[in-house]
Image: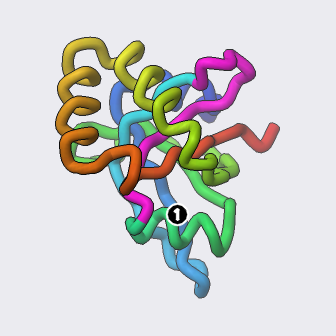
């Protein structure tokens, strides 16, 4: 039986696969946190200049799959759609990540912000296709 979007999204690490213009998959391991709004969306934080952000601008079609910290996929992928959040939501995305990942999330947020986080990062919102 195929996993659901929520089952995959609840794993500690998720392999986010974005697609190039010619359809080639490009997987990346990411942290994923439930949106603070509680509406079923999940958030990721990424550098605004990252290739995955550029690919999402071209096509919102993505897949997610359970994986380990190195990105080794541990289950079947599910289809999702991605959209880029306005940078004004970055603080909310940081809060969601620290809420989900605790001390590790706080450390991530601290070092990310020291490297210019709010200025250099962008939130990505994932939703199920169902």
Q: Number of labelled discs?
A: 1
Q: Is residue 86 left or right of residue 47?
A: right
Image quarter (top left, top right, bottom left or bottom right) of the N terminus: top right
The one nearer the camera, 120 or 15, is: 120
Q: Residue at x 40, y 13 (%)?
A: 99
Where does the image place residue 4, in percent across and percent down from the top left? 64, 29
Residue 77 in sight from this viewpoint: no
The correct choice, above or below, for 121 with respect to 24 in the image is above
Where does the image place residue 113, in percent across and percent down from the top left? 27, 39
Q: Residue at x 62, y 42 (%)?
A: 126
Q: Residue at x 44, y 61 (%)?
A: 48
Q: Residue at x 39, y 66 (%)?
A: 50
Where does the image place residue 11, in percent across and percent down from the top left? 41, 25
Element marked by disc 1? strand
Q: Quadrant of residue 59?
A: bottom right
Segment colored magenta: 35-48
Residue 40 shown in magenta: yes
Residue 37 shown in magenta: yes
Image quarter (top left, top right, bottom left or bottom right) of the C terminus: top right
The correct choice, above or below, for 110 with respect to 56 in the image is above
> Which residue is most to the right?
130
The correct choice, above or below, for 73 with respect to 89 in the image is below
The correct choice, above or below, for 116 with respect to 92 in the image is below
Which colouring convention does the figure follow? rainbow
Q: Which residue is mark 1?
A: 18
Q: Is residue 72 left or right of residue 16?
A: left
Where does the image place residue 124, in percent across and percent down from the top left? 55, 47
Q: Say few, some or many: other residues with alpha carbon within 10 Å of mark 1 (under 14 / 14 to 19 / 20 or more).
A: many
Residue 73 in sight from this viewpoint: yes
The one nearer the camera, 3 or 60, is: 60
């Amino acid at each position: 039986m195929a996993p659901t979007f929520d089952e995959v999204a609840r794993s500690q690490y998720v392999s986010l696969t974005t697609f190039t213009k010619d359809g080639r998959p490009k997987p990346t391991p990411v942290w994923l946190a439930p949106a603070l709004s509680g509406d079923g969306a999940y958030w990721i934080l990424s550098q605004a200049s990252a290739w995955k952000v550029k690919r999402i601008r071209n096509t919102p079609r993505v897949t997610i799959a359970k994986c380990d910290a190195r990105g080794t996929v541990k289950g079947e992928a599910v289809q999702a759609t991605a959209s880029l959040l306005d940078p004004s939501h970055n603080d909310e995305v940081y809060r969601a990540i620290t809420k989900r990942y605790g001390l590790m999330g706080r450390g991530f947020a601290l070092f990310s912000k020291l490297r210019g986080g709010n200025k250099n990062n962008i939130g990505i919102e994932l939703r199920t296709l169902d």
